[in-house]
Amino acid sequence: MTDRPIELRYDVRADDPESVRRLVESSGAFSPVEVEVAVELVEDRLRRGPQSDYQFVFAELGGRTVAYACYGPIPLTAAGFDLYWIVVEKSLHGRKIGKALLEKTEELVRQAGGRRIYVETSSRKEYSPARGFYLRCGYRQEALLKDFYAPGDDKVIFLKDAL
């Protein structure tokens, strides 16, 4: 972990869209369109409050947002949730912040009655660390949709059930 304790918060604040933008851009893995989508989800939560489909866990270090996860229930399923985003500031990779954030997200999903978490990601080389992370955290690859995003860019779907 880090020398200082990571603090988690669940409320979304007015400065979070810019924090999310900074985090997602700093990863180097996401396109400008993907960055905008990440920001839009935070803005949706700010605008709609609890009526939003998007829930968040933010990790702070010394009062600065250094990581976040975005998740939510999947409509028309009995107990399925999507993990939309999990991003850790690049300079803090390898310090188990992502794992702690994912474990807290799984706990919150369980508390909400969820039994399955789905994660969708790309097969592109830039996403290889993310795919390895999910496998190390107990997720399994459930499906691969060939050429989903573009030719040669498959959608990889991971699942963790029996939360």
Image (spheres, rainbow, N blue to C red):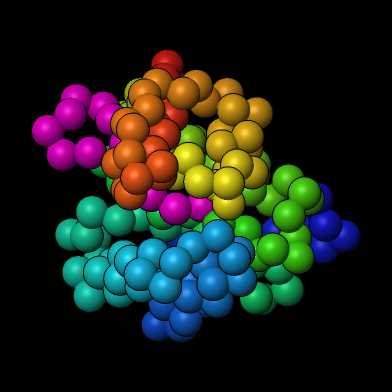
Vertical position of residue 153 compared to residue 9: above or below: above
Residue 75: image location, x then y, percent: 15, 39
Between 122 and 74, the one nearer to me in the picture? 122
Residue 113: image location, x then y, percent: 31, 29
Q: Please report the residue visible at 19 percent of the width from the left and 25 percent of the height from the top.
A: 78
Vertical position of residue 5 compared to residue 81: above or below: below
Q: Please report the residue visible at 69 percent of the width from the left and 63 percent of the height from the top.
A: 90
Between 75 and 134, the one nearer to me in the picture? 134
Q: Which residues are magenta?
A: 74-86
Is residue 85 in the magenta section? yes
Classify residue 71 as left or right of residue 76. right
Q: Residue furthest left?
A: 76
Is residue 115 in the magenta section? no
Between 149 and 47, the one nearer to me in the picture? 149
Q: Please report the residue visible at 33 percent of the width from the left and 39 percent of the height from the top.
A: 147
Q: Residue furthest front?
A: 151
Q: Please report the residue visible at 35 percent of the width from the left and 55 percent of the height from the top.
A: 55
Residue 160: image location, x then y, percent: 45, 24
Residue 37: image location, x then y, percent: 33, 66
Residue 38 in sight in this render: no
Classify residue 145 as left or right of residue 87. left
Quadrant of residue 82 in the image?
top left
Between 39 and 101, the one nearer to me in the picture? 39
Q: Residue furthest right?
A: 3
Q: Residue furthest top?
A: 162
Count the marks.
0
Residue 150 in sight in this render: yes
Quadrant of residue 79 in the image?
top left
Quarter placement of the C terminus? top left
